Image (spheres, rainbow, N blue to C red):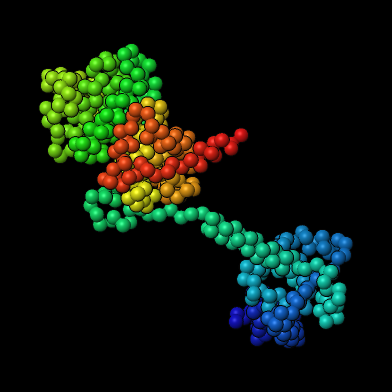
Amino acid sequence: MDHISDDNNPNLIKPTNFQGVVLMGCRKFGQEIRAHNRRALSVVNQNLLGAKAYPCVVNKRGLSKRNENFENSHLDPVHRPITRKCAAQISSSQRHCPEETKKLKPSNIPSSNEFGDCIFIDVEENKASSVDKPVPMFLEETATRLYEADDMEEVEMEDILVEEPSVDIDGCDAKNPLAVVDYVEDLYAFYRKMENFSWISPNYMAQQSDINEKMRAILIDWLIEVHDKFDLMGETLFLTVNLIDRFLSQQTVLRKKLQLVGLVAMLLACKYEEVSVPVVGDLILISDKAYSKKEVLEMERLMLNTLQFNMSFPTPYVFMRRFLKAAESDKKLELLSFFLIELALVEYEMLKFQPSLLAAAAIYTAQCGLYGFKQWSRTSEWHSNCSEDQLLECSRLMVGLHQRAATGKLTGVHRKYCTSKFGYTAKCEPAKFLLEDTLTQP
């Protein structure tokens, strides 16, 4: 306890333990404070037992000169004047409200002469009328803050319960050097930038005078069967289609040379992706010797010069692998996703979608077909940068392709995925309810 000596009597020591303020008065005043402190402790016990709070109510009187002087002082505008009998009660209440204790600084507490029109109402004497009386302002603010804190906690809990967490899909491959976990995100960020440059215009057939989109579909459907017969890697097929479209968008080709363009595109893709590359003679044989070796090499030189030797453009395949990992796919979902996206490779109208969106839509459509309801997790949305609404247009087109896969003349993809090698995936039911949602929309 700090002590302050009197100027007139240096031996007289005044206590200063009442909220850091010098207690004005004599020894009798200190005894009175201790008496009210004991009473305040009894009130605390009542509060612990569930009794009502011990109020200190401000008298509702008009503004007097004393109140005007009080308002002009440097008091905290939040607090109202209190009586000496209320002082002990405030001391006990501040032990429960540490925030209010900080507000009652020594410079803001009025002296004993400024306690004018504040009166103290006893709970025992006015139990009936205490309900209608106003509560002290500092108690009102404390209660309001507690209610606001409760509301904020409820809102935060609701957000946590509704919001689906995003899964770390690379944590399990931290020790796998082939997964390149340290820079895989940077790698796919670069792919997203590059796909804008490799994205082929969906109207490039308008500049072709001797071929059309149906001939393109026949060529790619045939190349899918050739790709399967040679047992080539998946990357090779997608790069082959990319090379064909990029070349046709820049070079006018005659109808009789279109199959040669497809063979040379597959040869270049094999040189870029495969370990064991088919020889030129094998490609001539599968074309029923329609072209010579010289013609193949000349077309290879023309295609490379036209494309300026740019072979490293991202195809839907690289995005498929990443998005399947984000979807935590199994073998069945993977096969159905590739079945849908290979159907999309054949169709010229699907060129209007970027490779990343095409891959995401194939996986989303496959999930809807297998599970019977719409499913697109927060993790898949995060890694694909595509929401469910953005995928619906492309997904509905894929459902239509799935329904028509076994009909018509172009059934190469359907026959491929009807084998045991691909788990008879083509026999899965398409997600027809996605098309029904379109019919029900106004």
Pick the quarter of the image with the C terminus.
top right
Whether residue 412 appears in this view of the structure is yes
> Residue sitting at 35 percent across and 49 percent down?
332
x%, y% of residue 235?
A: 26, 38
| Relative side of 82 to 384, left or right | right
Picture layout, residue 396 above or below residue 157: above
Q: Quadrant of residue 20?
A: bottom right
Query: x, y (%) of residue 80?
Result: 76, 66
> Where is residue 57 drawn, in percent x and y?
80, 71
- Give coordinates of residue 405: x percent, y percent: 38, 34
- Total marks shown come to 0
Q: Residue at x 47, y 36 (%)?
A: 396
In the visual, does 404 lie left or right of 194? right
Residue at 24 percent across and 54 percent down: it is 176
348 and 22: which one is in front? 348
For image coordinates 34% across by 44% down, the residue present is 425
Where, quadrant-wise, is the N terminus in this rendering? bottom right
Residue sitting farthest toward the top: 209
Please identify the quarter of the rendering in which residue 315 is found: top left
Q: Nearer the viewer, residue 133 or 200?
A: 200
Camera-nearest residue between 33 and 15: 33
| Residue 226 image-quadrant placement | top left
